[in-house]
Image: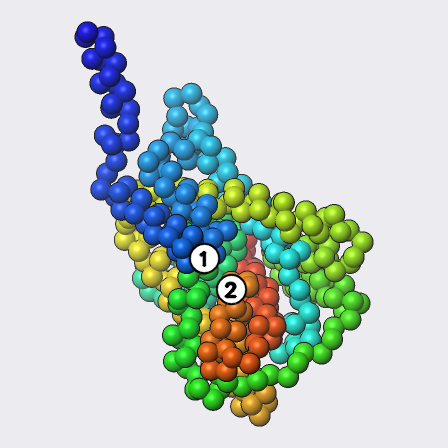
Amino acid sequence: MSYVGETLSNLLHQTAFFNLTWGNYVMILVAFVFLFFAIKKGFEPLLLVPIAFGMLLVNIYPDIIASPEETSNGVGGLLYYFYSLDEWSILPSLIFMGVGAMTDFGPLIANPISFLLGAAAQFGIFGAYFMAILLGFNDKAAAAVSIIGGADGPTSIFLAGKLGQTGLMGPIAVAAYSYMALVPIIQPPIMKLFTTKQERAIKMQNLRPVSKLEKILFPIVVTAVVCIILPTTAPLVGMLMLGNLFRESGVVRQLSETASNAMMYIVVILLGTSVGATASAEAFLNITTLKIVALGLIAFMFGTAAGVLFGKILCKVTGGKINPLIGSAGVSAVPMAARVSQKVGAEEDPTNFLLMHAMGPNVAGVIGTAVAAGVFMAIFGI
């Protein structure tokens, strides 16, 4: 009987109930909230479902992301090896290839002024950088945190790894992907605050047709120009444009389909679950993480506001030909931010179709955020 009792006691104490802290319960609740937004509300489910589930797993079983040095048998947890691919910048770069293969740069080519709107939305990144310095972050940590303002998870992970801020990578990545998913909640109030009903109802002229030659030349020219000026952007910009060249060349259909479908979804699973698994109670529930989350939100809000305000300037300059709402799409959340521009514009006039116009600043924002990361790396000599 004593053997049976001891065995049952051992089994009982192996359950998670005896190891969970109040912080673990808090993070499990956060994971449930994320799952609710992803499944019930449809907010970027491809990102939030794996992130939330990784968060759930690590707060029940922390060893799932333990390094080999932390385990008794010298073998790391499953998600530790997934996360290593984040730290080595492999998954963020592959994500960019998939995004490139899925993206039509035609709206940006047809309306090059979109580049300016995409650039304006990067204001939040550099504004948050100086705020982070004031809050006590060192220069590299401040740069890694501020890039959240671009609402670009892969670039946030990439820059944190390159700047040696792996200790902050988890909170930075979770914050960046969370704000990407919450674009439909965060952006509309800011967009309406800085625009009038008349501005939101502006109808833009149809974009000109873009030739096949232009679409083929675009990724080649952008890669050459950007990577010559900022070689450190090659892993992101290069992979983004390579994926787009697969799409537009028309001669490698299998590569385009693989990059935009099978490979993309595999990488999202690996990256999402590993990012979520960094959100353990010990790593997440502290003052530094709260600062990161707050700074990321401020940066994202500033970037949205800057894009809209610059859109208002262009509206005046062009005599009312540009709807300022498309400026909010200058953040990198593709294509969610463009859809939000369409939705807010349609609320004023259901016949107003801004989606394709907003895709120009949206994809420009992807390039802009990668360039901003390259600027930081160049400043620090990385």
* Quadrant of the snapshot with the N terminus: top left
The location of residue 40, given as percent across then percent down, is 40, 55
Between 236 and 104, which is closer to the camera in this rendering?
Answer: 104
- Which of the two discs, 1 and 2, sits closer to the camera? 1
Inspect this view and state whether residue 312 appears: no
Mark closest to the chain's N terminus, 1 or 2: 1
- Relative to 226, residue 80 above or below: above
The location of residue 177, given as percent across then percent down, is 45, 55
Find numbered disc 1 in the image and state the secondary structure of the residue it sits on: loop
> Which residue is the site of mark 2?
336
> Which residue is the site of mark 1?
42
Would residue 147 appear left or right of 283 to someone viewing this image? right
Do the residues bearing badges 1 and 2 touch, measured as CB atoms within 8 Å? no
Q: Quadrant of residue 282?
A: top left
Would residue 10 appear left or right of 309 to someone viewing this image? left
Question: For the point 39% across and 66% down, which residue is it?
Answer: 185
> Label 1 neighbourhood size at 10 Å, few (<14), some (14-19), many (20+)?
few
Question: For the point 43% across and 66% down, which residue is it?
Answer: 184
Q: How is the image coloured?
A: rainbow
Between 12 and 121, which is closer to the camera in this rendering?
Answer: 12
Distance, label 1 to label 2, CA atoms, is 11 Å
Tag 2: residue type?
A: Met
The location of residue 23, given as percent across then percent down, is 25, 43
- Relative to 17, residue 32 above or below: below
- Relative to 248, residue 311 above or below: below
Question: For the point 36% across and 57% down, which residue is it?
Answer: 292
Find numbered disc 2 in the image and state the secondary structure of the residue it sits on: helix
Tag 1: residue type?
A: Gly
